[in-house]
Amino acid sequence: MATLGRKDAYPLENYKRGTRIWLRDNEHVWLRAALEEDLKFTTQTFKVKREIDDEIAEEKFDPNFLPFLANPEILIGKDDLTNMSYLHEPAVLHNLRFRFEKKKAIYTYCGIVLVAINPYADCSQLYSDDVISVSFSVGLLGII
């Protein structure tokens, strides 16, 4: 078992050819990639196919710091982060970005916690009279 630098362990069997993972990147912070080969404790490096440009890249292998596993595509864009298989930094950031860019959604739940993205733009279309009325009637707005 590998520890990812923490107490919890992930079996190396989860890291087979074709498995989608997250890699740290200086420019993009996180990049999604697919393993081009099975990970083994005996290897020094492993090959991945980066999704951003379909390039094959070679990464250093450290069994104590395995890459984060990516969520299945069907879970991308969910309105509640707790519905995802993997809830870690790259998965959360990717889901928030996807929802903001593709669905124009600035709100995402994580259980009972509401995560809001500040778009630095006019969002008056989000607050129609109907939305305000419903929010007021269920007590979401503290307007007197």
Image (cartoon, rainbow, N blue to C red):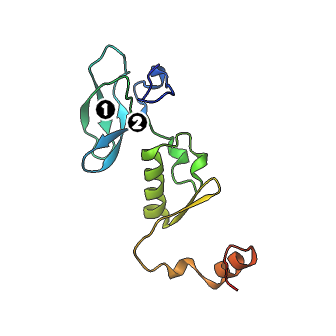
Height in image: 23 above or below 111?
above
Mark whose residue sits in front, 2 or 1? 2
Height in image: 57 above or below 133?
above
Q: Position of residue 65 (x, y in %)?
A: 37, 29
Residue positioned 60% across, 47% down in the render: 82
Q: Secondary structure at mark 1?
A: strand
Residue positioned 36% across, 16% down in the render: 41
Q: Nearer the viewer, residue 142 or 58?
A: 142
Q: Position of residue 78 (x, y in %)?
A: 56, 53
Q: Nearer the viewer, residue 88 or 56?
A: 88
| In this rendering, position of residue 80 left or right of residue 3 | right
| In this rendering, position of residue 139 left or right of residue 36 | right
Q: Position of residue 66 (x, y in %)?
A: 39, 29
- Label total for image: 2
Q: Which residue is mark 1?
A: 48
Q: Which residue is mark 2?
A: 21
Q: Amino acid at mark 2?
A: Ile
Q: Quadrant of the rendered structure where residue 3 is?
A: top left
Q: Position of residue 64 (x, y in %)?
A: 38, 24
The extreme right residue here reads 137
Q: Residues within 10 Å of mark 1 (few under 14, many from 20)?
A: many
Q: Quadrant of the rendered structure where residue 122 is?
A: bottom left
Inter-mark Cα distance, 2 to 1: 9 Å
Q: Amino acid at mark 1?
A: Val
Decide: marks 2, 1 in contact (CB < 8 A)? yes
First in sequence, mark 2 or 1: give its number: 2
Q: Residues within 10 Å of mark 2 (few under 14, many from 20)?
A: many
